[in-house]
Amino acid sequence: MTEPILRIRDVRLAFGGVRALDGATFDVPVGEIVGIIGPNGAGKTTLFDCISGFRRPDTGSITLSVPGRRPVELTAHAAYERTALGVGRTFQNARLFKSMPIREVLRTVQHDGMARSGFLRSVFGIGGSRQDEADVAARADEVLELVGLAAHGDKPAQELSTGMLRLCELAAVVAVRPKLLLLDEPSSGIAQRETEALGPLLQRLRDYLDATVLLIEHDMPLIMSVSTSMVAMAAGAVITTGTPSEVRDHPAVLTSYLGAKA
Amino acid sequence: MTELLSTLPGGLVSGAVYALLAMGLVLIYKATRVPNFAYGAMATFIAFFHYQLVSGKEFGFSLDVLFVHLDIHKYVQLPFWGAVPVSLVFAALLGLLIERFIIRPFAKAPTVTLILVTLALGLGLNALAQQWFGANDLIVSNEHAIFPRTPAFSIGGVNTSWERLGVIALIIVLAAAIYAFFRFTATGLAIRASATDRDVASLLGVSTRQLSVVSWVAGSMVAGVAGIALASLLVSSNPSILFLLSIKGFAAAIVGGLVSFPIAVLAGFAIGIIEELVRHYIVHADTKLFTGAPEVVTLGGVIVMLALRPKWIFRGIRDDEDSGVTAGAGAPTFVLARLIDPVEAYRLFRAAVPTGVTTARLGRLVRTIVLVGLAITAVTFPLLPLPRFWTLPVNLTLIYLLVMLSFVVVVGWLGQISLAQGAFVAVGGAGAAITANTFGLPFPFPILGGVLLSIPISVLVGLPALRLRGLHLAVATLAFGLAAERAIVPRFDASTYVRPPQWLQGDSAKYYVFLVLTALAFVFAWRISRTRVGRSFYAIRDSETVAAAYGIRPVRVKLTGFVVSGAIAALAGTMITYQLGGVSSNYASVTFSIFWLGNAVVAGLLTTAGPIIGALLFGLLPELTKGSVSASSISFVPQIIGAVLLIVIVAVNPSGLASMSRFVRSRVTAHAGDRSIEAEPPTPVDAEPVETRPELVGVGGD
């Protein structure tokens, strides 16, 4: 058994009197697509916020162990540092840089903290920064191709339909080559037909990145078909984990969804 | 003790005026959520009107269009208190007109748009006041003072006058009236309800439009009283002095979060009294060294307080997720730069005319030709047979270009609304003067010194900016700009005299040096816009959260942007120092900053082409016309037109001027019939509600 890529231990976060996360604990094995389900308010997005650094948990630890790298305690790092550590995420409401054409968006996200070419080198076009710009442009085109948006590269992000915006967001997160990909409801707000195409696309992206995926999703057919294992959450805690069908049929899951004993 | 007490009346009376201004601002903000940066200008305008009535004025109106010849002139003079009702009616009308024609179209606009619009309104009103009432200072003679200036009495050697006592009493009465209005009238209650939750209030039947009218009319009348009292106290004043005082009223109001009357009033008094104390104990100790110290202390205090983000200031204020610059304010695409740009013109033409000719390179070619033409003209300029007076306007034009470029970097690209770029001009001038006169270094070093000095100061200004956005950032930078103007400009004005080397004393030598410096800054900015540095700016502008999610460090990027834009403005400051011998408040004041921010927005805030066009249109053209007419007949018409233009351009599409080119294009394609340029019809983008994130940790932490 290899080390899990993400180890979440007893994460707690309260907003005033509301316990958004109440001791969430589970492991994410390397290379899997782990689906997270749960009713509204179960703490799924809050958990993503904690993993990606937009919220700091009150207590608990979140440990990232990318194979071949030293394990890191994520809660000790700011949001912008976690990209370099290998965490990428999408947002529930598909947020991107609205004013830019999407090809520009995909170049922007490959920022790398300007590690490879700093301010002066970039501005004066010296010290390999020209090559760097060319690489960035090439990778932007590559991921555009990958999600099938190559024909729309010059459109500003704010002119895209929600479905295309989702695709663009996926392309953006893929462009930074994360090892752990957090996808927050990629199907929300898009048409049924597009949802059906999403499953194969997610698998394609996972293979392209060779990454582990953590997926929040309300569309049961989609999450059942792509997940290799599932986690069910309710009231800020994990109620069960297992294979998709095990989790779906677990009595506690049914109770939490239906609000009564099934 | 007596000495301490003797400062009290002065401090109290100026504090009372700040408090009164703050009350008017809170009144309007509470009801409409409009931060009224034009408030000082409104007060000035009404005060000018009032004292014109009192001292007697020929109100004339003549029209000469085709066959219509109208010529109405009437001499009016009223006693002081007889003129007050007239002035208040005038104030009410002014408020009504402003609300109806300028504020209402922006009811749903983002805060940044409202800031720009009210700033433009303020500039326009100031220019209008000067055009209408003359550019001379307003002097309130003894017989026209609001209350007699005779000494009232003295307690323990502290003298006070009836005028001061009267103004303080007047303000107490007004404060009580406003309090009663909010406490006991239905409208007042409705405004309070609306301030707490606008949507709920309007669901419960409160008409927000009605509240807006009431608050603007009442606010305008309060402004009138404040203006009239202030002008009388100051004896001699002009629009820019009154505008600067109104900034302190704004500072007082923002300490109360722009919604709390008691805090705003207390803060107003505190600012007045602290200023007086500082003036008495510090400035008098060494006038030369500590000039501007009162402003530095009080406004610096306000900036620090804002940066500490106490809960009461930010309660009830919505922080926009993005900077709002592209989503509403910056008018980034429908701008002169875009209309004049051949590539854009070509695109519009292609969309409109169904032609099979593939002349895709034509636009690019024309653009290159225009640029090369400009460059050639610029290089050969001193060789052209032009009159001598051309040189100063042209050199100033280069300076304007740099100032606009610095606005492009910080507002257009980084999305941080800074109103303090003029202060960096002063910083650059100060740095140059110190390097040249104190350290005695020869020519190129003062330029370097000015730019280097701007870097730590940019970081200092950038630090509060890390925690502030939109309205608060605008006020913080405005406060910094005013403090810097007061502290720096008098010490480094033309009397410091930075002596250029022998070879640089000629006009054309200066011109070439300035041209090279401007070109360097320009290429530098252009390179930034084309590389990952620029892209990180745009990312922060569009959304700090998303930027952080992709590994962009908001702290570092913002500071980089502030430093770059500050350095560009400081470079302009060093150039001014060589041109005029020192900095001048004409080229470093807050008004200067706002004026050129407005011009940059109109010309195009997102591209490096904007400043070029803006400098030619708003810099060179007026400077030349100014140079050719005699100084006595200075016209403020360009400023008025500029302000109107700015408001109109921002108004054309208040919900998102970024979509202006789309707007034009969709019109054009509609006319072009079935020939659509896009393969897919544009679909409305996410109408889904954006999840609110009350608190984000770790985004800005460093």
Image: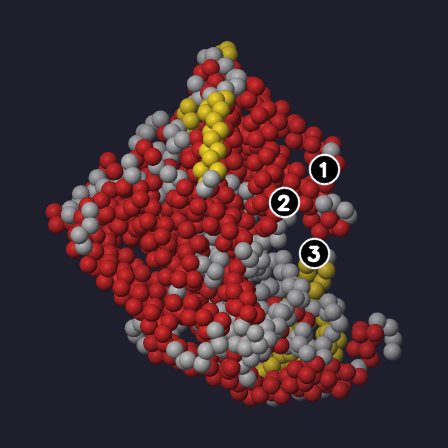
Q: Chain of mark 2?
A: B
Are labels 1 and 2 assigned to the same chain? yes
What x and y, as percent, mark residue B580? 24, 42
What x and y, as percent, mark residue A114? 40, 70
What x and y, as percent, mark residue A97? 52, 68
Q: CA distance from mark 2 to mark 3?
A: 31 Å
Q: Going by the image, does A94 lie left or right of B2?
A: right
Is residue B184 shown above or below B447? above
Q: Is residue B668 visible?
A: yes
* Nearest the eye: B548 or B110: B110
Q: Which residue is mark 1?
A: B187
Q: Which residue is mark 3?
A: A16
Bin the neighbour count of mark 3 within 10 Å (Cα to Cα): few under 14, some 14-19, many 20 and up. Answer: few
User: Where is the C terminus of chain A found, in terms of image quarters?
Assistant: bottom right
Seen at 40% across and 39% down, the residue is B636
Are labels 2 and 3 assigned to the same chain? no
What x and y, as percent, mark residue B676? 55, 76
* Nearest the eye: A187 or B353: B353
Q: Say the numbered circle drawn on residue A232.
A: none
Bin the neighbour count of mark 1 within 10 Å (Cα to Cα): few under 14, some 14-19, many 20 and up. Answer: some
Seen at 33% across and 49% down, the residue is B621
Q: Amino acid at mark 1?
A: Thr
Q: Which residue is mark 2?
A: B32
Seen at 45% across and 81% down, the residue is B356
- Mark 2 vs mark 3, foreground winner is 2
Q: Amino acid at mark 2?
A: Thr
User: Where is the N terminus of chain A found, in terms of image quarters?
Assistant: bottom right
Is residue B358 shown above or below B151? below
Q: Is residue B219 visible?
A: no
